[in-house]
Image (spheres, helix red, strand yellow):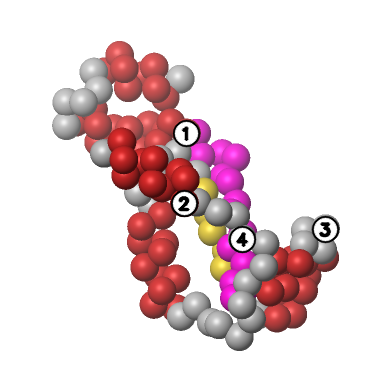
Amino acid sequence: MLNDFESVVKSRRSASKFTQGIDISQKELEQIFSLVKFAPSAYNLQHANYVVVTDPLMKQKVYEAAYKQYKIQSSSAVIAVLGDLEAYKDSARINEGLFHLGFFSKQELDSEVE
């Protein structure tokens, strides 16, 4: 497992230029987002929402708003990650399943919600 982790860390790159003219299909996007939901989040609130921008006019607006980063214009899609600032209000509902499964005591559930 450590070797897998090391491989992921060492091979990760942040792209700044993309090959233009390559589209990401709706099916590929659906596959990506079906996996993203498994990524951990603070307090397991899953507070992130994603907006996929592929329309050239909307990408231009994102480009302007993002300090004219070249990668926005050359990318097949821009994925804006938005955080729900009120996700904590849903903490009881999110964690009650863990309580009912016996992973949390009532005290731990109350503490998590607090």
2 vs 1, front mark = 2
**Which amino acid, mark 4?**
Ala
Residue farthest toward the top in the current orientation of the protein: 107
Please provide the residue range marked out in magenta: 75-88
Question: Quick check: 63 left or right of 89?
Answer: right
Q: Is residue 86 magenta?
A: yes
Going 32% across and 22% down the picture, which residue do you hit? 109
Would you place residue 14 above or below residue 86 in this image?
A: below
Q: Position of residue 106 (x, y in %)?
A: 26, 18
In the picture, the quarter occupied by the C terminus is top left
Q: Nearer the viewer, residue 107 or 23?
A: 23
Within 10 Å of disc 4 (Cα), the crowding (few <14, some 14-19, many 20+) is: few
Residue for badge 3: 67
Residue farthest toward the bottom in the current orientation of the protein: 21
Would you place residue 49 above or below residue 64 in this image?
A: above
Q: State the CA–CA distance, disc 4 to disc 2.
A: 12 Å
Going 35% across and 49% down the picture, which residue do you hit? 38
**Which amino acid, mark 1?**
Ala
In the picture, the quarter occupied by the N terminus is top left
Dividing the picture into quadrants, the one containing residue 70 is bottom right
Label 4: element kind: loop
> Which badge, 4 or 1, is on the more N-terminal residue?
4
Would you place residue 107 above or below residue 32 in this image?
A: above
